């Protein structure tokens, strides 16, 4: 009969095994999970509103929310980054870094992240991306998405942008011979102090026109805080005319106020996304969530990796 003490020791070792030992690479026909979250004024708590004003979000609490979705990629909005936007080519957020450390301890893998610049000043409401390097790899460097400046553009000219946050994209691969895709985080202009539906349409048009200039891959995911209160807004129609499907076309609420502000757009004609799924992660206790974390709920896009077809 086996020694009971040895059995107990073996069980203890198994339970204490590091989480990264359980992380498996993505294979064909396996799901890829992308979580998008506007983390209200992360790094600038005094700018938060209502019951969240002055409350700094705790990294471990943020990681606990993300654990529900087991993300491979996290799309970030409304995050402050340290350093000068004009001088640093790759910005990072200490709050996001701490959140990812907590996620590594609980979920496993090795996480990296980057915040995308705006044109001037220090960053207080940036978009960005984080990814589990044990699950996906980057292909090249991120790029700002913009229309073709034309042959007459002066040397060093910077493209004008339709909104306050220039759009950026980064390409990922699930592995050798598997699906590769571009992720474009969005945080379009809010209407809290006016009607900016037409500006959001211009921001959408900027992306759809710029994708052809900046990326040669048709597998593009545009995801984040669209600030569109209904699926019939001009910006969503602009995306549809460019061949994208709004996965939140049923207007599922993604904001504590009940509005469907957050969206995920995928190509209508690409097989990887034919069965893509969209999910909102609402909290059990809305008031506590708003105070301690954010006024937006995370959204989850899931699609199936396959052999690369382009």
Image (cartoon, rainbow, N blue to C red):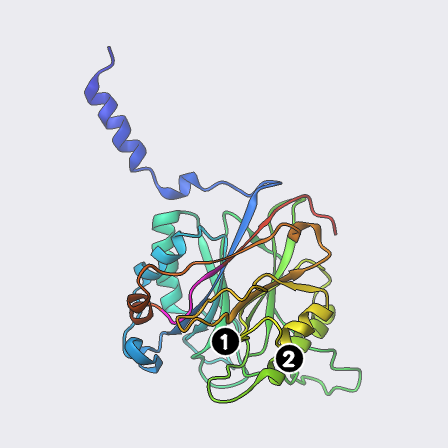
Q: Nearer the viewer, residue 283 or 151?
A: 283
Q: Is residue 184 left or right of residue 110?
A: right
Q: Which residue is mark 2?
A: 201
Residue found at the far right of this picture: 151
Please report the bounds of the magenta region as a residue range. 294-299
Q: Is residue 74 left or right of residue 3?
A: right
Q: Nearer the viewer, residue 259 or 181?
A: 259
Secondary structure, magenta segment, majority class: loop
Regarding residue 70, the answer to whether it shows in the image is: yes
Q: x%, y% of residue 208?
A: 69, 72
Q: x%, y% of residue 227?
A: 52, 76
Which residue sits at x=71%, y=85%? 155
Q: Which residue is mark 1?
A: 88
Within the magenta stretch, is there residue 295? Answer: yes
Q: Is residue 98 left or right of residue 206?
A: left
84 shown above or below 34: below
Q: Secondary structure at mark 1?
A: loop
């Amino acid at each position: 009969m086996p020694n009971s003490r040895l059995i107990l020791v073996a069980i203890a070792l198994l339970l204490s095994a590091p989480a990264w030992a359980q992380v498996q690479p993505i294979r064909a026909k396996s799901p890829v999970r992308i979580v998008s979250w506007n983390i209200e004024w992360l790094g600038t708590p005094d700018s938060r509103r209502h019951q969240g004003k002055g409350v700094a979000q705790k990294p471990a609490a943020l990681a606990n929310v993300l654990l529900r979705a087991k993300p491979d990629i996290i799309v970030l909005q409304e995050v402050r980054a340290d350093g000068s936007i004009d001088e640093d080519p790759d910005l990072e957020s200490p709050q996001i870094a701490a959140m990812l450390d907590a996620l590594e301890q609980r979920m496993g893998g090795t996480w990296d992240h980057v915040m995308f610049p705006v044109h001037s000043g220090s960053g207080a409401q940036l978009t960005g991306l984080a990814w589990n390097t044990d699950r996906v790899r980057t292909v090249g460097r991120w790029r700002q998405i913009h229309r073709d400046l034309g042959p007459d553009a002066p040397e060093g000219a910077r493209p004008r942008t339709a909104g306050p946050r220039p759009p950026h994209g980064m390409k990922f691969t699930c592995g050798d011979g598997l699906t590769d895709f571009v992720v474009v985080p969005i945080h379009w202009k809010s209407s809290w102090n006016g009607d900016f539906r037409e500006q959001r349409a211009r921001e959408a048009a900027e992306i759809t026109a710029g994708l052809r200039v900046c990326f040669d891959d048709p597998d593009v995911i545009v995801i984040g805080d669209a600030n569109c209160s209904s699926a019939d807004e001009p910006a969503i129609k602009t995306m549809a005319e460019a061949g994208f499907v709004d996965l939140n076309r049923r207007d599922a609420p993604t904001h504590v106020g009940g509005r469907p502000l957050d969206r995920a757009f995928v190509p209508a004609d690409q097989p990887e996304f034919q069965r893509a799924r969209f999910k909102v992660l609402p909290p059990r206790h809305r008031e506590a969530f708003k105070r301690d974390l954010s006024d937006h709920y995370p959204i989850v896009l899931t699609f199936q990796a396959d052999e690369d077809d382009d």
